[in-house]
Image (cartoon, rainbow, N blue to C red):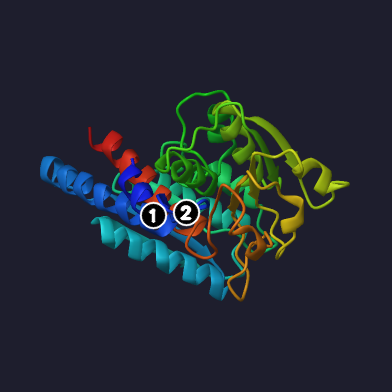
Amino acid sequence: MFSLYIAAQGSCMSTLLLDGKAVSLATEKKLAQRVADLQARSGRTPILATLLVGDDPASATYVRMKGEACRRVGMASLPITLPASTSTAQLLAQIAELNANPDVQGILLQHPVPAQIDERACFDAIDAGKDVDGVGCLGFGRMSMGLPAYGSATPQGIMHLLAAYELDLTGLHAVVVGRSPILGRPMAMMLLQADCTVTVCHSRTRDLARHLAGADLVVAAVGKPEFVKAAWIPDHAIVVDAGYHPGGIGDVELGPLKSRVRAYTPVPGGVGPMTIATLMQQTVIAAEQSFA
């Protein structure tokens, strides 16, 4: 746990900063030791394959960051870049090749893909044992039923961050703003598994302020800059902002909240680093199972 860090940072503050960068660094340090142990036992190095379709600069940056994280923990990355003209059939063939490759323990398909590709079909084609980004329907279903599965990386990273700060979620009213299949929906299910009472809202929810008024925990994952207004959030709430937009702003109007909520994630430096750390952690788990 991260209790020593909390004590050092939070002892003289009424609002707790949920520092995802610090927690991710601590996580990577532990993962590096696990990777070293794996290499010593098996003589093999875990490999995460990343699939990038097209030349979107932001997606390329995210893939590069994941490769750098692999190197920090001692794993190897296998970056594969396909042209923007790639068809669904061609991408499925590449995924099938990686599924069959015993040297690859994890597969990540960078979202989004070009419009002509059936992204859901490609996500679901990734072998469940290698779906370390947690994007497949099978993994989502198993996670929702409380069965072993790799959770979708961003919401799972949020859960790890909340656990690192030993925040008790039992009985809290959690409001998730966003319903995407790889963030909002799995986030809601994970919070339900953690004994929260969960309300799911989205960009078309009527009177969002009313739903947020009774929230103990707010997770904003709607993909719109400062969509969630500070005035809508109660003083006692835990605020998790999963958005990131140019200028370093998130989905929450965060400035007015920093001195009055129970806890909050900064943007940047909150949820983002935890997403990558969780991807690394789930790849290490996949390798431990593969090398056993």
Residue type indicated by callout 2:
Met
Specify the label residue 13 is tagged with: 2
Which residue carries the number 1 mark?
Answer: 9
Quarter of the figure with residue 86: bottom right
Q: Are marks 2 and 1 in contact (CB under 8 Å)?
A: yes
Q: Secondary structure at mark 1?
A: helix
Residue at coordinates 75% horizontally, 44% vertically from top-left? 212
Of the pair 111 and 117, the residue shown nearer to us? 111
Left or right of 165: which side holds 76? left
Viewer-nearest of discs 2 and 1: 2
* Residue 15 position within the rendered picture, expressed as x and y whole percent measured from the top left: 53, 52
Quarter of the figure with residue 22: bottom left
Q: Secondary structure at mark 2?
A: loop
Residue at coordinates 40% horizontally, 49% vertically from top-left? 11
Looking at the image, residue 286 lies above or below residue 147: below
Q: Is residue 188 visible?
A: yes
